Amino acid sequence: MNILIIGAGGFIGSNLSEEILERKKEWNITAIDISDAKISHLLNKDKFNFIKADIIKETEIVDDALKNCDVVLPLAAIASPLTYVQDPMRVFELDFEANLRIVKQAAKLKKRVIFPSTSEVYGMCSDEAFDEYNSNCVTGPICKQRWIYSCSKQMLDRVIFALGIRDNLQYTLFRPFNWIGPRLDDINNPNNGSSRVVTQFLSNILHGKNLKLVDGGAQIRCFTYISDGVDALIKIIENKNGCANQEIFNVGNPYNELSIKDLAYKIKELAKSYSRTKTFAEAAKIEEINSSEYYGKSYQDVNRRVPSIANAKEKLDWIPQVNMDELLKRTMDFYFK
Ligand code: NAD
Ligand code: UGA
């Protein structure tokens, strides 16, 4: 099978590529990204064909690669809340417009699309657990620009769903719920908001900075270790007996539910056991900060985000394996050892 991974140089793309090269020797990967910084160790693999390209400016390269693949994963996007608030149009142009073009081209060429939706599509939904086929998508006022990412992804979900009906586009939508692991973000960037929360806290400690609890840190997230996410993706790509066809899957770990405040104290405690961060971890304070100060006034938050994974369990025979302590240990071993 010929797999096209656009954004293969990123967190999910690099981990997925690594696992496919390890486990699926009969699959070929064509990888497109503007950066190979996180995949330099894969460039010499004979089943991994990397093409450096900007999917916004070099559309002909993308279209050529689409013609030669069986399935495409358009992973290239901006997935950082600070950017949603500070540069919403850049999020729209890449996450929506550039990916809309790819999805429509794939439909025209009759290629299967496996699209990275997001848990953010549910927004501030009040359901106990978010369900792919029953939960509402609840976003805030237009002035809260954080939601441009959620709406970009939701609109693509809706376009793909519609193309599935009108043009019989073969697709699967997957919704990662806070996937965490090696190469998530660059923790050498000490600026607040430069990373997602786990890597942000690791970065704070590494640079001797305090950990900030935005609006008090009572927000709840469910964190998923990258190996569980990649296992689900490989099952989706395999698509045994068409189990993933025209499906939407939450890919998250409801058993790893905790508040950001509890996360901060956990990370501070665990960081004391690494020689590189022991001193800083002992000194680091955990303090509160207002979201408008931390992100800006057009930020709005998701207070509780818990996935129902019944669909993935039933159709993919998938269940997450890595608990929160193990998730943090493996991630901190990668960044701190
Ligand atoms: P990432 O930022 O690590 O990777 C994105 C990749 O896209 C990067 O390697 C970047 O170089 C590349 N890219 C950006 N602009 C490009 C361009 N113009 N041309 C070519 N390549 C370009 O992100 P990620 O965490 O791996 O997320 C991958 C996808 O999954 C995204 O669509 C994201 O919205 C989605 N997602 C991720 C998570 C998560 O927990 N990480 C959660 C929900 C959804
Ligand atoms: C993230 C991003 O939108 C995407 O990577 C992805 O689509 C989404 O997760 C997902 O998994 O689907 P979010 O979880 O809000 O969304 O992003 P984080 O930056 O990881 O923040 C998580 C929580 O921690 C937020 O409530 C944030 O305010 C808080 N936070 C973050 C702090 O309290 N302190 C910090 O230093 C950083």
Image: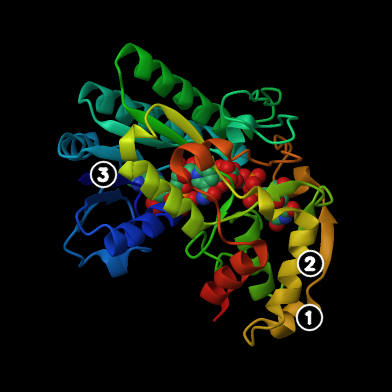
- Place of residue 299 in the rendered image (x, y in percent of width and height, measured from the top left): 70, 37
Q: Which residue is mark 1?
A: 282
Compute the Cα span from label 1 to label 2: 11 Å
Pointer 2 local density, CA inside 10 Å: few below 14, some 14–19, many at least 20: some
Classify the position of the N terminus by image quarter: top left
Compute the Cα span from label 1 to label 3: 45 Å
Pointer 3 local density, CA inside 10 Å: few below 14, some 14–19, many at least 20: many
The amino acid type of the residue labelled 3 equals Leu
Q: Is residue 263 above or below residue 133?
A: below
Label 2 element class: helix
Q: In the image, what residue occupies the spot 64% across and 88% down?
A: 275
Q: Nearer the viewer, mark 1 or mark 3?
A: 3
Label 3 element class: strand
Q: Which residue is mark 2?
A: 265
Q: In the image, what residue occupies the spot 37% across and 49% down?
A: 234
- Discs 1, 2 touching: Cβ within 8 Å: no
Classify the position of the C terminus by image quarter: bottom right
- Place of residue 54 in the rendered image (x, y in percent of width and height, measured from the top left): 30, 44
Compute the Cα span from label 2 to label 3: 40 Å
Q: Is residue 214 above or below residue 71?
A: below
- Place of residue 92 in the rendered image (x, y in percent of width and height, measured from the top left): 48, 31
Is the CB of the residue bearing disc 1 within 8 angstroms of ligand 2?
A: no
Q: Residue 281 falls in which quadrant of the image?
A: bottom right
Residue lying furthest top? 166
Give me the disc on residue 4: 3
Q: Nearer the viewer, residue 192 or 216?
A: 216
